[in-house]
Amino acid sequence: MKILIADDSAISRCLVQKTLERGGYEVLAVENGRSAAECLSSADGPRLALLDWVMPELDGLSVCRQIRSLSNHPYIYMILLTSKESREDMVKGFEAGADDYLTKPCDPEELKARLRTGQRILRLQDKLIQDARQDPLTRLPNRAFFLDQLAGCVKRARRRPDYIFAVLFVDTDGFTTPSDK
Amino acid sequence: LEADGSDLRRAEIEIINKEEAMIQPDNRSSDPSLDLQELLTRLDNDCELLRDLLRIFKEEFPCLLQSLQEAEVRGDMKGVEVTAHTIKGMLANVSFARAAASAACLERMGQQSVTQGLPEELASLEQEASLAVAELEAFCTEMIR
């Protein structure tokens, strides 16, 4: 699984990168908050992130807020890994949208265990979204999926005048009998 | 004056943290200069990684220390706080316990705009970091042998 490390300290990046590569993760490392936000908001960006708090250009809290403000984007599990140790800072971190909070230096086993928790939550989140968007019997996209797609198309059409979309209504006669079977 | 529960909680946390941030009686003399055992456990006894970390430390630390000294000369206490914070994290990562305690003290001094004793604490940070580097270098040399 891909994971992003954002830290301006080369020592921290090197240490965490080595720990995670040993644990089988594919690691992307950046040294400032702006690059972290760009990477996480890209279409196929990592869904797990370890963010330092104090970073140049954009701090870890701002990255969390920016990512949480994205709509229609897959959930990203973000852990703040920082030297800020006070309870007030921890509360601020969670309020900014972080899922977990670790202080430096962190124990490698604890870090990996917390990342496994993150992966479990991402799987549950994906399952929840999938179940909400498809019919449980036919496994076909349902009304919620259709409305979601429609809203996306309308938004795009408003933004780009050259974007055209059509809605096709299809009805299947006598569907109740086979579906009851 | 009206205050809801969250305002009161926030104020309470602020007071607790201010109390915690007050310069505590110094107990760092009990800390080792370099906690080698803790470091090796955390690195899973990877000596190659240990050497890499030492190399990076020796490249990065002088620049950060210089920034910290410059911030102190300018009287830029926010700069002292932020740079000391970065140095604290770096020192903690390599288990330089006493130097990390010194950086934490400098961070609090920056936070509270305490200038008294700042040059002495800076000198202490530099000295403690040098001692720990020397200890770690000696260990790495021993490992190569």
Image (cartoon, rainbow, N blue to C red):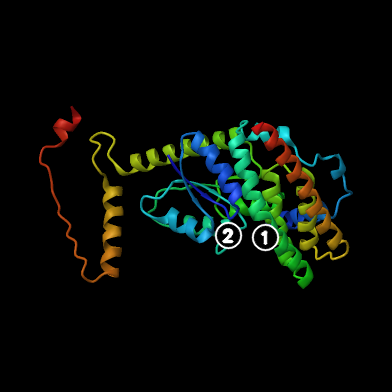
User: Does residue B4 lie above or below B55 as drawn?
Assistant: below
Judged from the image, the secondary structure of the residue bearing numbered disc 1 is: helix
Q: Position of residue B84 (x, y in %)?
A: 73, 57
On residue B63, the disc is 1
Q: Position of residue B138 (x, y in %)?
A: 73, 38
On residue B126, the disc is none
Kind of residue sitting beneath label 2: Asp
Residue A59 visible within the image: yes
Query: Dot 2: few (<14), some (14–19), or many (≥20) neighbours within 10 Å?
Result: some
* Mark-to-mark CA distance, 2 and 1: 21 Å
For this rendering, which residue is in front, B29 or B48?
B48
For this rendering, which residue is in front, B53 or B91?
B53
Look at 49% across and 56% down and name the residue there.
A36
Which chain is home to disc 1? B
The quarter holding residue A53 reads bottom right
Q: Is residue A105 left or right of residue A144?
A: right
Look at 63% across and 39% down and name the residue there.
B50
Q: Quadrant of the C terminus of chain B?
A: top right
User: Does residue B103 lie above or below A122 as drawn?
Assistant: below
Look at 68% across and 59% down and name the residue there.
B64
Q: Are marks 2 and 1 in contact (CB under 8 Å)?
A: no
Query: Dot 1: few (<14), some (14–19), or many (≥20) neighbours within 10 Å?
Result: few
Q: Position of residue A22 (x, y in %)?
A: 51, 34
Q: Quadrant of the N terminus of chain B?
A: bottom right
For this rendering, which residue is in front, B5 or B96?
B96
Kind of residue sitting beneath label 1: Cys
Tell which residue pokes out farthest to the left in this image: A173
The residue under label 2 is A59
The quarter holding residue B139 reads top right
In front: label 2 or label 1: 1
